[in-house]
Amino acid sequence: MAQIEDLLAQIKNNPKNVRFADLMKVCNHYFGEPRQQGTSHCIYKTPWAGDPRVNIQEKNGKAKVYQVRQVLDAIEKLEEMKDG
């Protein structure tokens, strides 16, 4: 768990330079195994209504910045749901 928290802190501090493998570890921890993988995309299901998925994509070993921000927003929403 400490490793995931460390990765999450690093991602929050520098969302423009995130290794795809690190973002995938964090997503696997918070959202479970992806519904789709094996292509350049990994799609994770989230527990809320609306657009209940998080989509991440690898580009040259890195994660796309806008997708990193979407993951951070989804994790924040998930934490709020647990607290509230």
Image (cartoon, rainbow, N blue to C red):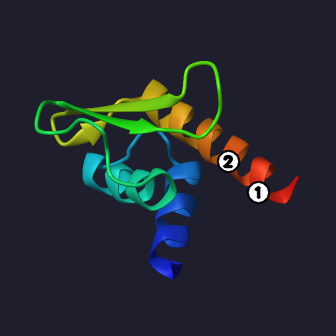
Looking at the image, is 48 positioned above or below residue 30? above
Q: What distance separates the C-alpha of mark 2 from that of mark 1?
A: 6 Å
Residue marked by disc 1: 82
Task: Identify the residue at horizontal 60%, vertical 40% (top origin).
Answer: 47
Tell me how many marks there are.
Answer: 2
Question: In this view, which residue lies farthest toward the top?
Answer: 50
Task: Identify the residue at horizontal 24%, vertical 35% (top origin).
Answer: 36
Residue 61, percent from left and from top:
18, 42
The reply, left or right, for residue 77 in relation to residue 53 is right
Pointer 2 and pointer 1: residues touching (CB < 8 Å)?
yes
The reply, left or right, for residue 77 in relation to residue 63 is right
Question: In this view, which residue lies farthest toward the right?
Answer: 84
Q: Quadrant of residue 64?
A: top left
Residue 34, percent from left and from top:
31, 44
Question: In this view, which residue lies farthest toward the left?
Answer: 38
Residue 49, percent from left and from top:
65, 25
Badge 1 amino acid: Lys
Q: Residues within 10 Å of mark 1 (few under 14, many from 20)?
A: few
Residue marked by disc 2: 78
Badge 2 amino acid: Leu
Q: Residues within 10 Å of mark 2 (few under 14, many from 20)?
A: some
Could you tell me which secondary element the residue under label 1 belongs to?
Answer: helix
Residue 50 tag number: none
Task: Identify the residue at horizontal 88%, vertical 52% (top origin).
Answer: 84
Looking at the image, is 19 positioned above or below residue 7? above
Q: Nearer the viewer, residue 19 or 77?
A: 77
Residue 62, percent from left and from top:
26, 40
The reply, left or right, for residue 28 in relation to residue 2 is left
Task: Identify the residue at horizontal 45%, vertical 32% (top origin).
Answer: 54
Could you tell me which secondary element the residue under label 2 belongs to?
Answer: helix
Q: Nearer the viewer, residue 18 or 41?
A: 41
